[in-house]
Structure formats: C-alpha cells, structure tokens
Image: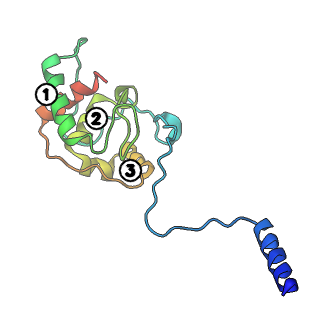
C-alpha cells in the first residue's frame, strides 16, 4: 500500500512539473486590450492623388478661404447621421479616417465618392485601391444630392 501511495505521489509530482496546458474555453471571447491605431498614410498602398477628380457629376469644386459655418453645420449633422457607422475623424474603422482627407484627395473626388460610390468603386483606381485596403468593405450609396454632399465636404474641412 505504501509503494502504491509513493508511486501516486511521484506520478503527480512528475505531472505537475510538466508543461502547463491552457484550457480552451468554448464560445466567444473578446480581447479588450487597447491596440495602437495606425493613421492612414500614402505608404499604406493607396497613393495620394490630388489631381484625380473621380468618376461622377462633380467636375469642379472651389472652397472659399474660410469655412462656411452653415454648410459645415448641416454637413456635420448629415455626417453624424449616416457616415459615423464606418468613418471617424482620426481613426480607421470600416472606412478610412477622414481628418486631412483634402491632403490626400481632391474635393471633387471626395464629393463624387459621396454621391456616386458604386461607379467610383468600379471605375476609379484610388477607390479600387481603398476597397482592397479595407477588405472589400464597400461604401454604400446613401443617395445624397449634390447640396448634401457639398455640406459634408465643407464639414470635412473642419476636422
């Protein structure tokens, strides 16, 4: 009996000295550690192109030196209602961060993307590259008119 007890003790000691195995829990698990966010830059594969006006009805946009506050306010309201599900000012989400967008894209390109994302994603090389970079997450057509798109474009200047 004593030999059996000794063998059991030795066996359990040997087992406890072995590699610790982590049990996998079944079900959904979420890791909530904060990750460093990466800002969109031209080095991420999508080139900066201020000459590309995109595909759509907008061929010319001229911004005044000062932001039109009324347009920007209307644009902010529309942006918060329909765009924030995919876009934030300074952080990439489903779509790119929009702060400084006019340092990477022309105002015409931005407005054509807002008004005409379906055609832009099919025909515009920058839109295609963004689609690829954002895991083929398409920008949905919100059926905005030119005035609404212009208001959003003005709001984006304030970011």
Q: How is the image coloured?
A: rainbow
Residue 20 on image: x %, y %: 71, 64
Quarter of the image with the N terminus is: bottom right
View extreme (bottom): residue: 1
Quarter of the image with the C terminus is: top left
The residue labelled by disc 1 is: 74
Which mark is on residue 131? 3
Return the residue nearer the eye: 88 or 25.
25
Quarter of the figure with residue 98: top left
Q: Which tag, 2 or 3, sits closer to the chain's start?
A: 2
Q: Can residue 60 be seen by looking at this rendering?
A: no
SS type, badge 3 = helix
Crowd around label 2: few <14 · some 14–19 · many ≥20 (10 Å) = many
- Residue at coordinates 76% horizontally, 68% vertically from top-left? 16
- Residue at coordinates 80% horizontally, 66% vertically from top-left? 17
Residue 11 on image: x %, y %: 81, 77
Residue 155 on image: x %, y %: 23, 26
Which mark is on residue 114? none
SS type, badge 1 = helix
Indicate left or right for 43 with 18 as reference.
left
Return the residue nearer the eye: 20 or 103.
20
Indicate left or right for 77 with 14 as reference.
left
View extreme (top): residue: 65
Vertical comparison of 89 with 129: above or below? above
Q: CA distance from mark 1 to mark 2?
A: 17 Å
The reply to whether dot 2 and dot 3 touch (C-beta < 8 Å) is no
The residue labelled by disc 2 is: 110
- Residue at coordinates 44% horizontally, 33% vertically from top-left? 48
Indicate left or right for 156 with 99 as reference.
left
- Residue at coordinates 22% horizontally, 16% vertically from top-left? 67
Residue 109 on image: x %, y %: 29, 35
Crowd around label 1: few <14 · some 14–19 · many ≥20 (10 Å) = some
């Amino acid at each position: 009996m004593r030999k059996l007890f000794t063998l059991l003790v030795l066996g359990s000691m040997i087992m406890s000295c072995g590699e610790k195995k982590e049990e996998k829990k079944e079900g959904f698990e979420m890791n909530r550690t904060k990750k460093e966010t990466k800002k969109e830059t031209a080095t991420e594969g999508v080139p900066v192109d201020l000459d590309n006006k995109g595909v759509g009805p907008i061929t010319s946009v001229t911004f005044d030196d000062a932001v039109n506050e009324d347009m920007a306010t209307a644009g902010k309201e529309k942006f918060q209602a329909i765009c924030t599900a995919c876009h934030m000012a300074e952080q990439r989400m489903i779509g790119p961060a929009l702060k400084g967008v006019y340092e990477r894209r022309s105002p015409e390109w931005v407005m054509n993307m807002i008004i005409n994302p379906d055609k832009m994603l099919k025909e515009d090389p920058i839109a295609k590259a963004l689609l690829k970079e954002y895991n083929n997450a398409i920008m949905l057509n919100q059926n905005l008119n030119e005035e609404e798109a212009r208001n959003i474009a003005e709001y984006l200047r304030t970011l």
